[in-house]
Structure formats: structure tokens, C-alpha cells
Image: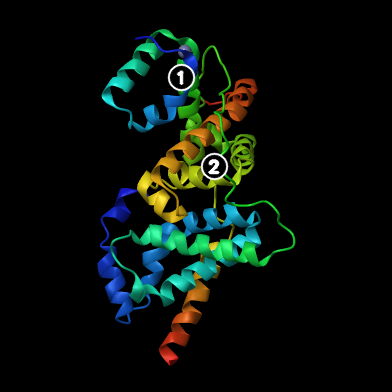
Amino acid sequence: MVIACKHVWDYLSEYIDGTLSVETRELVQRHLDHCGICSAILDSTRNIIILTADERVFELPVGFSERLHAKLDLEFARAQDR
Amino acid sequence: MTVSPFEARDESKMIASIVAGNTDLYHELIRPYERSVFMMALSYMKNEADAEDVAQEAFLKAFRNLADFRAEAKFSTWLISIALNEARGRLRRRSTARTQSLDVPEEQGGVSPALLRDWREIPSESVERLEVRHMLQRAVGTLPDIYRNVFLLRDVEGLNGAEAAQALGITIANVKVRLHRARTLLQKDLAPRFKRLEPQKKRWLPWS
Ligand SMILES: [Zn+2]
């Protein structure tokens, strides 16, 4: 069975996560083996996921941890007094 | 959150000790989750000051209610749901300004990716460029709320489908659909931009 590009796109996210059934995965794999466009969509999507997951992209504001832990210490002192 | 050193910690033991009065250990317990809680608060509140407020309040509430924590959930998931409730509560109280609903119905129909003939990999070092970080932050920031929340939990903070579903109070199937749409929207937005990105000029190295 051959599937069209449009249908392959619907499966790419689950393909990346490895949650497709064995049959569907093979179907998608066979398509990817000969379709440059779908392969490029897969590669770019994967690439973008890896980049956004990089811890340098989303960082805590400067001083966030210090302020948080200082606030917690106040709370602990209050809890002790009770 | 998928980072292994934290998996090795016995969080239920830590929690028992904190509840018994060893409150200082709470600092250590929450350290791995500071960013997740802040990021999710920011995703809802859309500005850093409010997000920091929500995050602080969530960590305080979690501390005060730590004795009620039941181990059927992961501590991180429980913590994130406390933060999300806090954020939702504040947005609800802010009745006037915001009309945008956080729970817009799932839109019908799929999203199409950007079509490319080939893809030249963007290496991880490129996030050292401010320009690249801004592109990524803006793209994630402009996703519709329901897609961004799922994307952040799954792909940025590394929760699995069940954990993300639990934190957001939606089904696992919903998480899958929203994650797929989020990834496709990001590919559609970012892939063409990355293609146009000037390659970084090679740094001059004395030995080359
Ligand atoms: Zn194709």
C-alpha cells in the first residue's frame, strides 16, 4: 500500500515519538525512503524540536532562584513560629 | 525533567523528611523544577513579573500542602498543576482585560507543514546566536495557547504524554493532537526562516 504525502504528515509527530503501530511505522518509513519532501519535513521538525529543547533558549530571569529561595526561607521561619 | 541525576533522587523520602520538619530540604527538592514551573506560568501570564509571582506562589502552596501530596502522581506533575491552577485563577479574576479563552475548542482540520526539498541541519551551537534564540522564543511564544502549553511540557520540559495530560487536565489523545499541531506550526514558521539564516561566519582560529 502506498500513502500520499498529506497522510504521512499526520503521522510524523508520532513517528518522531516512536508511538506508531508497527504497520503504520513501516508504511511511513517506506514513503520516507523515496520522498525527499517528507524527509525534509521530518528532518526540519526534529531539528527544531532539538533546538527549542536546548536549555540556552528559555532561561529563568536573572535572580529568579535567589528571590524564590529567600521567600521560601521566610515561609519556613514563619512555619517554625507556629 | 528527563535528566537522569534527578531520577536517582528518592523524592518521596525527601518529602517525608520535609513534612517531618526538615524544611531546608525543600530547597533541594524543587531546584530541578524551577524552570518548568516558571515557563508554564509564563505561558499563561505572558509577562515575566506575573509569571514569577505565580511561580513563587505555587512553590509556597506546594510547600504548605506537601503533607497532602500522594505518590500516585509525580511530584513534578503535581507541582506544575498547582502552578497552572494558580495562573488560571489569576487570569479568571482579571475578568476585564482578557477575552481570549484558555480552553478554546479544538479547531477542526489539520495544519500543513512548510514544504522543503531538502534540509541542512542547524547545529545546536547555533543557539549561542541571539538571533536564533529570538527566532525560537518568538515562534513558541506566538503559538496558540493550547498548543504552546502542550509543546512546552512535552518537548521543552520533557514530560511524557500521561504526565502532560495530568498536569493540564486533558486526555492523552488531546495531548497527542495538540503536540502534533504545535510541532507542525513551528516547522511551518521556522523552517523557511532557518533556510534563509546566514551561516555563522567561521571563527578565526589560529591553528587553521
Ligand atoms: Zn512525501
Other-residue count near label 1 (Cα within 10 Å), few / some / many at <14 / 14–19 / ≥20: few
Q: Amino acid at mark 1?
A: His
A14 relative to B81, above or below: above
Q: Which residue is mark 2?
A: B147
Indicate left or right for B70 with B46 as reference: left
- In the picture, the disc for residue A7 is 1
- State the separation of the CA atoms marked 1 and 2: 21 Å
Position in image of residue B187 (x %, y %): 55, 28
Parent chain of label 1: A
Position in image of residue B73 (x %, y %): 32, 60
A38 relative to A68, above or below: above
Residue at 43 percent across and 70 percent down: it is B62
Q: Secondary structure at mark 2?
A: helix
Residue B142 appears in the figure = yes
Other-residue count near label 2 (Cα within 10 Å), few / some / many at <14 / 14–19 / ≥20: many
Q: Secondary structure at mark 1?
A: helix
